[in-house]
Amino acid sequence: MLLEICANSIESALNAQNGGADRIELCTHLEVGGLTPSHGLIKVAKELLNIPIYVLIRPRAGDFMYSKIEMEVMKEDVQFCAEMGCAGVVIGCLNADRTICWEQTEQLLEKAGYMDVTFHRAFDQCPNPFEALETLREMGIQRVLTSGCPTSAIDGVETLGELVDEADDDIIVMPGGGIRPENLKTLLQTGASEYHSSAIPKGEYTTSVEMVKAMKSLLK
């Protein structure tokens, strides 16, 4: 089973790697759910890390309905990640009714080229997660990051298990949202093969090497 760490800085990314994480999702501003890191941050992370880097593509806080101009920014960021040799990008575009925006998602998928694509927790705002999962499956998205719709994954454990079953081997359902060593064991009952955490202790701002190690030990 794999552990992805949401890293909000170079220090967090290095701590994730040193703790044994399998890959990172690189972002900034976790206080608003994460935003796209600067090109400089992406470049330096690529130079210093030897585990796969997925980059969050989200130009601003707030909803996940994007204007044409915002889409141009996002497409440029995806293109840069491809040029830098990143392993994947993490995206999420919704319509006004909070269903998956097929057109915008497809545009970003096209730009992603060889890279893996994860649909992030915008998914948890969809009114019907099973319909949303089917849409993403049809589009060829590799993975969806979800808490099962509640704020935290532990509260959505039942739905997460159902989504994992529904996904079968066509798309990866990766639980995320408040995952810590103390609740990861419960979440293993979902049957998921990948898990997502920032591994940042309460009151701190940087990923903890010890917390990453503790979670990795549970996933062996």
Image: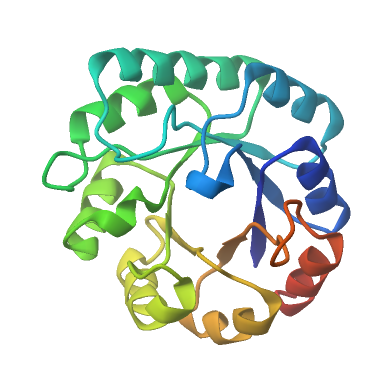
Position of residue 76 relative to residue 37, above or below, is above
The outermost residue toward the front is: 203
Position of residue 187 relative to residue 72, above or below, is below
Relative depth, front residue between 48 and 180: 180
Position of residue 48 relative to residue 100, above or below, is above
Residue 193, image quadrant: bottom right
Q: Is residue 188 left or right of residue 220?
A: left
Residue 155 x, y percent position in the rendering: 41, 80
Residue 203 x, y percent position in the rendering: 71, 63
Q: Quadrant of the N terminus?
A: bottom right
Residue 81, image quadrant: top right
Q: Is residue 188 left or right of residue 216?
A: left
Residue 34 x, y percent position in the rendering: 52, 42
Name the residue: 20% across, 35% down: 102
Name the residue: 78% across, 68% down: 211
The outermost residue toward the left is: 97
Position of residue 43 relative to residue 177, above or below, is above
Number of residue marks: 0
Q: Is residue 21 left or right of residue 160?
A: right
Q: Quadrant of the C terminus?
A: bottom right
Name the residue: 88% across, 53% down: 18
Residue 126 x, y percent position in the rendering: 22, 55
